[in-house]
Image: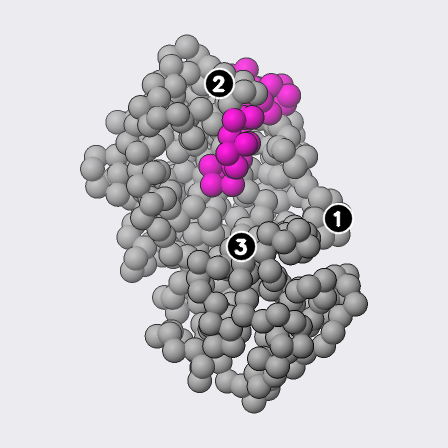
Amino acid sequence: MPELLPFRNFHYKMGRGNPEILKALVCPPYDVISEEEKIAFKKRHPDNICHVILPDNYEAAGKKLNAMISDGTLICEKDRCICIYGIDYARPDTGEKVSRYGFVGLLKLVEIFPAKDGVLPHEMTFKKFIDDRLRIIQETDSNFSPIFTIYNGKHGVAEKIFKKYVNTPPFLQTVDRDGFTHKIWEVWKKKDIEKFKEIVKNNVIIIADGHHRYITALKHSKEGGCKYIMTLFIDFNDSGLIIYTSHREIREISVKTMAEFKDKIKDYFEFKDIENYENLNDLMEKNKGKHVFGFYFQNKFLFLKLKHNISPEKYIQANQSKEWKNLNLPILHEILLTKCFKIDKEHITYVKDVKEGIENVDKGKIQALFVVNPTTLMDVQEITANGEIMPHKSTYFYPKPLSGLVIHKHTNNIE
């Protein structure tokens, strides 16, 4: 069963009580920082955490971290705590202001491929990313942003604890590049810490984001590193938790006109011409949970729906369950992209913002765009419960925790 420990919360001393200074010191997770942003974050402050998580060379990461601890830039208390992590933000689709709360502690590392001991993956990992993160953790033996996990907190135990803290001034607070407010409260009361431990112990923990860091930390633990990883736990019943799905950009497609496109898909899909993206978005929204897609090509929008007589299991040859084959992305890739158009993987790229994808078509950067409805939490639960992995680029959990806001530094007496 999953196991939680409190941790010594290393944080920026100069950022306490000063959101503006803290803003100059933290950054997003390493895997969502562009090359241009990396340069900008490093220029923002000589102690910005980007110098450690995306260093000029791996040895520099360890030296920079140790220097910041030695000179008091990063400090921690002697005792261990659990942190409550809150984010206030506006939903991108509606502008509605919402808050999301979770708690941060150390999750015991266990094998996840295959999964056991109640910690489940939902995505595959790729060796090149693991190698990179392994070099960082070997030099630092630290975690700079928590991996992101979800669990079914149907009894609302964590929420009851949150209410005792979140109406008091936060221990740390800052604003990220998107204008979202991130807040940290430290929980020291033994009774509350024990309740957090029980939540983790009594639930299946699904890794939502951070698979590469998890596998890296697990590998490092077998070489003498820490046997725990800093983890954010979010109740998936929290209305502030959003899942996006990456839309598919097509660099080359084997049709020259929309009429030719329709002819190639007519045996498998019903379709309807749509006047603009707003109308397409409304139709996609109304058909959530169904096998539908949007398509943009040559300044024209099309709404696609899998025909009722087409069984995904018949056309998708993967050695997966019926539930997996009925997900939208296997249908998109195996029936539309492969069977109808024989599109190679190297001609597919991914974009989270539909409007950016549309703009890329208009500018000629790509030839076409397939729009996909977001993956649901029910999908993730069902597939992971089957012991299966979600299709590649099917989830993007949002919003993400910052790097450098709370830090776990492994010491010999942590375990």
- Give the distance between the C-alpha atoms of the residues marked 1 and 3, in whole angstroms: 27 Å
20 drawn magenta = yes
20 relative to 211, above or below: above
Identify the residue shown where x is 56% and y is 26%: 40
User: What mark, if any, has residue 350 been given in the picture?
Assistant: 3
The answer to which of 88 and 152 lies nearer the viewer is 88
Q: Mark 3–mark 2 contact, CB under 8 Å?
A: no
The answer to which of 296 and 330 lies nearer the viewer is 296
Going by the picture, which residue comes out furthest to the bottom?
Answer: 309
Identify the residue shown where x is 65% and y is 81%: 270
Q: Name the residue under label 1.
A: 96
Three-letter code for the amino acid on which mark 2 is drawn: Asp
First in sequence: mark 3 vs mark 2: 2
Q: In which quarter of the image is residue 36?
A: top right
The 10 Å Cα crowd at callout 3, few under 14, some 14 to 19, many 20 or more, is: some
- Give the distance between the C-alpha atoms of the residues marked 2 and 1, in whole angstroms: 34 Å
| Horizontal side of residue 415 vs 398, given as left or right | left
The 10 Å Cα crowd at callout 2, few under 14, some 14 to 19, many 20 or more, is: many
User: What mark, if any, has residue 47 been given in the picture?
Assistant: 2
Circle 3 or circle 2, nearest the eye: 3
Counting from the top left corner in percent of width and height, residue 334 is at 46, 73
Identify the residue shown where x is 63% and y is 23%: 19
Quadrant location, the N terminus: bottom left
Q: Mark 1–mark 3 contact, CB under 8 Å?
A: no
Q: What secondary structure characterizes most of the magenta part?
A: helix
- Give the distance between the C-alpha atoms of the residues marked 3 and 2, in whole angstroms: 32 Å
The answer to which of 76 and 388 lies nearer the viewer is 388
Quadrant location, the C terminus: top left
The structure's colour scheme is one colour
Extent of the magenta region = 12-41
Q: Quadrant of residue 131?
A: top left
Three-letter code for the amino acid on which mark 3 is drawn: Tyr
